[in-house]
């Protein structure tokens, strides 16, 4: 447990993120004795509400959200930490209430669970109310801009009030235990890292498929699309962790520097190669687990005219460096797909020569890293069939590793618990640096420009499928196919 005197200020305390993720995560940290006894939480939002009322409502929400993890004893101490402070973000004099609540001897962490358009005004008013000092930290939720230029504006604005070392940019994928385990897998196991390059690996696939649609966020999502929503951040973070060079130490600066180098080494997709390297899709009506679901254009709040916004992206990406020359990385992500699955699949090259009669090329070794739903790693290998009749017949067998042992109370830790703990500890290793944000926007901007120059239309796919047919041909044209467990 951190013994530092730290208080948390949650802007957007009545929003969806706070209710579904942040308060449950803080409750779990308290339950696990990872929250310092003196840490206080200021819940800030603009609604007129008594503090006791807020606390009572939050108690009900937590009870529902936490289910079996709810605990009366923890709640009775946790609720004492919370104070509701009503602030309209545009009214600077209202920030004085926060100043009155704060204590200069303590570190204040400001968590922006608000739309990014609010970051600037909140920072300015915090500054004017003298709430920020050299110890303060700020946590930013994505999106950090919608392209390189706007991301620079967001970063410049926040950078006027906080040094880079005090800015924690969240990508919740980095809080997933299995993503952190990727570092352990790669760099703690000699058998893995000596086979981690173009001499051993044929290609790598990264899939983040979701069954959910856009969950009532049509107006927001229609101007954003799956490339900005999922690829610019989560998928490129996964790619950079899979492909980066070994950092010298497991420390923020070292890891971030390697990720930036990797992002900068990605070959751009531009108007000359976009049709062979990228597919945009949009779901039409279909069914998921036998339940009918509507298409994107029939979602609640959708516009009447058609929209060319993508809800699916498949990409073939190359990394221009010594280690990965010639190895394609196939990335795909989409809404309303057949199953919820996030996985990284490393397919190894064939043996140079087949000495077994049934050692066919469809049986390469494969390392499958499953980030969700059933976290684990599987290594597909060939082994001799246990059979007297055949002399040396082979079969594919799988070594299974429970990547993620449920922690002591048999529960899988949520990404936000880990991330909040790291912010409280003042460790940046699971947060995204400004350089990373800018390098990944730079790469995405090229692709967005190529789509716009070529007027690339979305290809339709039925909800409940694995995306448009073009996504299959993207990989099948190379003699490979998407991996399904
Ligand atoms: C968010 C996106 O960042 O990640 C959502 O904005 C998406 O659109 C979500 O649904 C997926 O997260 P996870 O952890 O469920 O894979």
Image: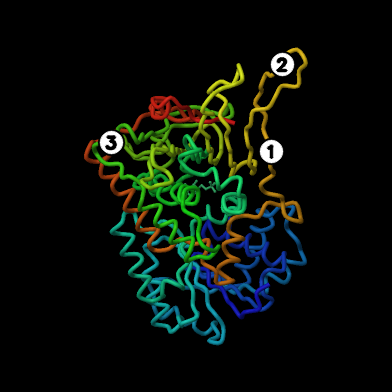
Disc 2 target residue: 391
Q: Considering the image in quadrants, where does the N terminus appear?
A: bottom right
Q: Considering the image in quadrants, where does the C terminus appear?
A: top right
Depicted 82 relative to depicted 132: above or below: above
Question: In which quadrant of the rendered view does residue 122 lie?
Answer: bottom left
Horizontal arrangement in the rendering, residue 149 relative to residue 402 (left or right): left
Q: Earlier in the sequence, mark 3 or mark 1?
A: 3
User: How far from the left and from the top, in percent, is residue 322?
Assistant: 40, 47
Q: Are marks 3 and 1 in contact (CB under 8 Å)?
A: no
Q: Residue at x 49, y 78 (%)?
A: 136
Q: Residues within 10 Å of mark 3 (few under 14, many from 20)?
A: few
Disc 3 target residue: 273
Marks 1 and 2, how far apart at CA: 27 Å
Q: Residue at x 68, y 36 (%)?
A: 399
Q: Secondary structure at mark 3?
A: loop
Disc 1 target residue: 400
Q: Return the residue nearer the eye: 352 or 317.
A: 352
Marks 3 and 2, how far apart at CA: 49 Å
Q: Residues within 10 Å of mark 2 (few under 14, many from 20)?
A: few
Report the mark closest to the observer, 1 or 2: 2
């Amino acid at each position: 447990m951190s013994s530092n005197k730290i208080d948390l200020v949650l802007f957007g305390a009545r929003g969806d993120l706070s209710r579904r993720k942040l308060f449950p995560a803080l409750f779990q940290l308290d339950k696990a004795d990872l929250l310092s006894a003196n840490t206080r939480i200021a819940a800030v939002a603009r609604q007129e509400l008594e503090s006791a009322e807020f606390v009572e409502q939050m108690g009900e929400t937590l009870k529902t959200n936490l289910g079996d993890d709810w605990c009366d004893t923890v709640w009775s101490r946790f609720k004492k930490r919370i104070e509701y402070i009503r602030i309209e973000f545009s009214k600077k004099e209202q920030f004085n209430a926060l100043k009155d609540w704060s204590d200069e001897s303590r570190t204040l962490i400001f968590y922006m669970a608000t739309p990014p358009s609010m970051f600037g005004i909140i920072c300015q008013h915090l500054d004017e109310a003298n709430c920020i000092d050299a110890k303060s930290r700020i946590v930013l939720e994505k999106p950090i801009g919608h392209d390189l230029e706007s991301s620079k504006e967001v970063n410049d604005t926040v950078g006027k009030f906080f040094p880079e070392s005090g800015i924690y940019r969240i990508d919740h994928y980095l809080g997933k235990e299995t993503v952190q385990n990727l570092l352990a897998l790669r760099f703690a196991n000699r058998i893995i890292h000596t086979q981690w390059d173009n001499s051993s690996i044929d290609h790598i696939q990264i899939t983040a498929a979701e069954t959910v649609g856009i969950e009532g966020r049509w107006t927001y999502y229609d101007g954003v699309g799956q490339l900005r929503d999922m690829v610019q951040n989560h998928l490129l973070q996964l790619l950079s962790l899979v492909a980066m060079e070994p950092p010298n130490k497991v420390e923020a600066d070292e890891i971030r520097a390697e990720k930036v180098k990797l992002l900068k080494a990605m070959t751009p997709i531009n108007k000359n190669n976009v049709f062979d390297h990228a597919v945009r899709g949009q779901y039409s009506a279909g069914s998921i687990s036998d339940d009918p679901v509507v298409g994107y254009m029939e979602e609640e709040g959708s516009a009447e005219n058609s929209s060319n916004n993508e809800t699916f992206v498949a990409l073939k990406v190359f990394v221009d460096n010594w280690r990965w020359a010639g190895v394609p990385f196939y990335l795909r992500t989409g809404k309303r797909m057949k199953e919820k699955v996030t996985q990284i699949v490393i397919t190894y090259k064939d043996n140079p020569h087949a000495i077994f009669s049934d050692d066919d090329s469809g049986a390469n070794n494969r390392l499958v890293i499953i980030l969700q739903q059933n976290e684990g790693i599987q290594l597909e290998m060939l082994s001799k069939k246990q059979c007297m009749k055949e002399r040396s017949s082979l079969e594919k067998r799988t070594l299974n590793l429970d990547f993620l042992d449920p922690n002591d109370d048999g529960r899988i830790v949520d990404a936000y618990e880990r991330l909040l703990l790291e912010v409280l500890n003042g460790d940046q290793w699971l947060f995204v640096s400004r350089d990373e944000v800018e390098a990944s926007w730079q790469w995405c901007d090229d692709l967005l420009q190529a789509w716009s120059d070529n007027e690339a239309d979305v290809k339709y796919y039925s909800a409940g499928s694995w995306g448009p047919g073009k996504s299959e041909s993207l990989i099948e044209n190379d003699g490979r196919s998407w991996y399904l467990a």
